[in-house]
């Protein structure tokens, strides 16, 4: 891995020691800025930039900065490789990792993989693969506040439950507490979801772009705002489903093919959690073939054997 990476850098950055052009996206925060006041004397300006002292200064500074950056990148590559993390894949997905100090990366790794958080290396690698921002986010001003928010304000019960929440939704670690997590928490509480610690996966969702449009969709079907919100309170996972790929085809089948009233989903919003092709259609067709009509929960929630037995009993009664 290290040899492959070193070959990558040497082939990709052939002039690294001279001008480092390929890594021009890096922000040299500590590079000394050179500024000059306008001078009406053209000869004075020209002689300044042509002077040997100035040329030597810029050349030496550029070379030193380039060598420092190359050394820093090499050290990060070796360190992350020792953890089983593919550095080259990460920088392709998240270039800011190139300019993040190794000491900052190590601080995050230590915090997340030692008590009390205590993720295993395998779990940590998965977190980083799904949320590379974790390695570049400031530990004290970002990552620790996110952890504290989940434990104190959301009410996650224990470190074990915290690890479960982050395994399920690593993107929580990339979210701002003030601009994302807390506003979403307040929105969920306003519509009546009073156990947000059970639905932490929703906290990384945008209120304006994801949550509100889904409630609006059911309002457009004729439900009141209160009734629509009550569906999501009863079944918060409903927020995670796509309008175009889930709501619309399943509602169309419910009303057109099954001939049911759309209001049935008010009492059973879990309808949207079942596969249209593998559960809803086959069971409806089996019921229709025998002239049986079940309430949606009876038709969909029972296992296959239970459904078949119930269907036969009701068919026998009809006969």
Image (cartoon, rainbow, N blue to C red):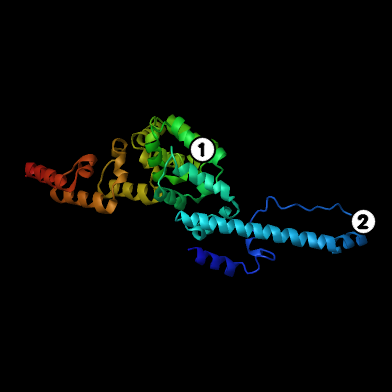
According to the picture, the residue beneath numbered tag 2 turns out to be 40
At 34% from the left and 37% from the top, the residue drawn is 235
Element under label 2? loop
At 58% from the left and 57% from the top, the residue drawn is 73
At 49% from the left and 59% from the top, the residue drawn is 89
Where in the figure is residue 7, as x and y percent of width and height?
54, 68
Where in the figure is residue 252, as x and y percent of width and height?
32, 49
Mark 1 or 2: the one toward you? 1
Label 1 and label 2: CA atoms lie apart by 54 Å
Where in the figure is residue 211, as x and y percent of width and height?
44, 40
At 84% from the left and 53% from the top, the residue drawn is 36
According to the picture, the residue beneath numbered tag 1 turns out to be 144
* Front residue of this view, candidates 306 and 117: 117
* Front residue of this view, candidates 265 and 260: 265
Q: Is residue 101 visible?
A: yes
Element under label 1? helix
Answer above or below: position of 27 versus 264: below
Name the side, left or right, on which 282 lies relative to 142.
left
Where in the figure is residue 17, as x and y percent of width and height?
67, 65
């Amino acid at each position: 891995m290290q040899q492959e990476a070193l070959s990558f850098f040497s082939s990709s950055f052939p002039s690294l020691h001279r001008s480092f052009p390929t890594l021009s996206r890096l922000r040299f925060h500590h590079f000394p800025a050179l500024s000059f006041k306008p001078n009406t004397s053209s000869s004075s300006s020209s002689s300044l930039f042509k002077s040997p002292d100035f040329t030597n200064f810029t050349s030496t500074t550029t070379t030193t900065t380039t060598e420092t950056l190359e050394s820093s990148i090499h050290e990060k590559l070796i360190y992350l490789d020792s953890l089983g993390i593919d550095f080259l894949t990460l920088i392709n997905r998240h270039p800011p990792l190139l300019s993040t100090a190794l000491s900052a990366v190590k601080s995050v790794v230590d915090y997340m993989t030692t008590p009390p958080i205590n993720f295993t290396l395998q779990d940590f690698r998965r977190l980083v693969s799904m949320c590379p921002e974790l390695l570049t986010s400031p530990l004290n001003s970002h990552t620790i506040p996110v952890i504290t928010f989940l434990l104190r304000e959301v009410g996650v019960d224990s470190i074990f439950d915290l690890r479960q929440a982050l395994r399920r939704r690593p993107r929580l670690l990339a979210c701002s507490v003030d601009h994302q997590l807390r506003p979403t928490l307040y929105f969920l509480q306003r519509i009546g979801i009073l156990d947000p610690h059970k639905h932490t996966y929703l906290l990384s969702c945008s209120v304006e772009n994801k949550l509100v449009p889904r409630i609006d969709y059911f309002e457009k079907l004729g439900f009141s705002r209160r009734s629509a919100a009550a569906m999501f309170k009863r079944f918060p996972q409903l927020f995670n489903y796509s309008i175009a790929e889930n709501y619309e085809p399943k509602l169309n089948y419910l009303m057109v093919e099954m001939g049911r009233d759309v209001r049935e989903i008010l009492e059973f919003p879990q309808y949207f959690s079942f596969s249209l092709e593998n559960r809803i259609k086959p069971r409806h067709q089996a019921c229709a073939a025998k002239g049986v009509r079940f309430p949606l929960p009876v038709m969909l929630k029972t296992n296959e054997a239970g459904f078949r037995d119930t269907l036969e009993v009701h068919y026998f009664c009809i006969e």
